[in-house]
Image (spheres, rainbow, N blue to C red):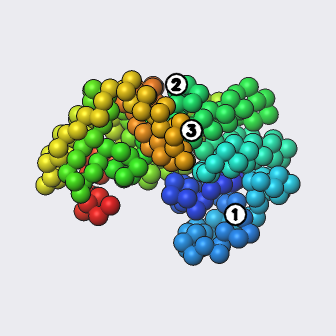
């Protein structure tokens, strides 16, 4: 019998992390552990997710990203660490750096950092507050002789694109809003499909020190509006908010006056899409032909009734 590959999942109770946990647990040739803090189970929603993962065979191990000495034991005997953490720099940068160092000390072979985003490697420092954190971790992983890495890049999550954070859709007011000329292509993938591709990446040794770039669909803003209207009962009023250069100026002005980066973070992500700087390059969706990612057309038809409630 072939030995099972031991994997440590960090961030198992988040939207993306939970789906990845389920996808990993369904792989018969993986043994999956999930890192949890002592007090995580006090959150009823998190507790429900962890119980479900345990029912699927995932083993829980205790540790805290901000307590480095707790991480080495969690990483011991692990081949691949999958990080799906989210939050501020203390967690995403400092916490992941602690995790990388623990993985090195424990002899882990590969590290999948918490990306699951547009291709931030083409963005300039400062273009996006949160993606700066990912750039910092990627920089730390490059040239690491003890630990190989695999990036998972998928464009904007489809669920985020249609949410209020996505900027574009205001279905209550019947508006479709965007910056730029509307003709710049961007990529999008559902959380479910990102999880499926991540599970495959864990088993794919050919992805060491590279990026797995996948897209469920690729469209422009104008194409997105047409696609939405063709598959729903709603006709949206198109509102162009200005050029990409004007969006950059808007962000800069907002950064000077905002009380929190949350006041402009969604616009920064929108900039990554409409500027083309976050566009994926060599999309590798065909690497796993058994995965048939959900198209935007299919997603819109399936989730429209939920979208109108946001």
Circles 3 and 1: CB atoms closer than 8 Å: no
Nearest the eye: 230 or 106? 230
**Residue at which label 2 appears:** 122
Which residue is depicted at the point 33% across and 38% down? 217
Circles 3 and 2: CB atoms closer than 8 Å: no
Q: Callout 1: 10 Å neighbours few (<14), some, many (20+)?
A: many
Q: In this view, does 207 lie above or below 7?
A: above
- Gap in angstroms between the C-alphas marked 2 and 1: 33 Å
**Residue at which label 1 appears:** 36
- Quarter of the figure that contains the C terminus: bottom left
**Mark 3 or mark 1: which is in front?**
3
Going from N to C along the chain, the mark reached first, 3 or 2, is 2
Going from N to C along the chain, the mark reached first, 2 or 1, is 1
Q: Quadrant of residue 247?
A: top left
Q: Quadrant of residue 152?
A: top right
- Residue 69: give x, y in percent of width and height: 86, 54
Is 206 on the left-hand or right-hand side of 231? right
**Residue at which label 3 appears:** 129
Label number found at residue 206: none
Which residue is depicted at the point 37% across and 27% down? 246
- Gap in angstroms between the C-alphas marked 3 and 1: 26 Å
Q: Callout 2: 10 Å neighbours few (<14), some, many (20+)?
A: some
Which residue is depicted at the point 55% across and 47% down? 260
């Amino acid at each position: 019998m072939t030995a099972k590959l031991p994997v440590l999942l960090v961030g198992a109770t988040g939207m993306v992390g939970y789906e990845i946990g389920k996808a990993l647990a369904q792989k018969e040739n993986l043994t999956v552990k999930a890192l949890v803090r002592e007090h995580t189970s006090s959150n009823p929603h998190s507790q429900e997710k962890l119980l479900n993962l345990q029912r699927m065979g995932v083993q829980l191990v205790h540790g805290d990203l901000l307590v480095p000495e707790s991480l080495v034991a969690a990483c011991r005997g692990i081949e691949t660490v999958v990080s799906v953490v989210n939050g501020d720099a203390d967690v995403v940068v400092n916490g992941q750096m602690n995790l990388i160092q623990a993985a090195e000390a424990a002899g882990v072979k590969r590290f999948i950092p918490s990306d699951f985003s547009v291709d931030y490697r083409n963005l300039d420092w400062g273009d996006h507050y949160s993606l700066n954190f990912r750039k910092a971790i990627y920089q730390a992983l490059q040239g690491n002789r003890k630990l190989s890495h695999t990036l998972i890049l998928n464009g904007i999550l489809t669920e985020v694109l249609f949410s209020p954070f996505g900027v574009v859709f205001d279905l209550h007011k019947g508006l479709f809003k965007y910056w730029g000329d509307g003709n710049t292509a961007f990529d999008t993938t559902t959380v479910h499909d990102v999880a499926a591709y991540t599970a495959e990446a864990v088993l794919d040794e050919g992805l060491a020190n590279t990026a797995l770039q996948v897209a469920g669909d690729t469209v422009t803003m104008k194409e997105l509006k047409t696609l939405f209207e063709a598959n729903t009962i709603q006709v949206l009023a198109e509102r162009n908010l200005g050029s990409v250069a004007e969006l950059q100026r808007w962000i800069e002005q907002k950064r000077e006056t905002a009380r929190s980066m949350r006041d402009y973070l969604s616009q920064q992500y929108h900039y990554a899409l409409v500027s083309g700087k976050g566009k994926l390059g060599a999309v590798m969706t065909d690497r796993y032909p058994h995965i048939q990612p959900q198209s935007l057309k299919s997603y819109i038809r399936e989730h429209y009734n939920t979208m109108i409630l946001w």
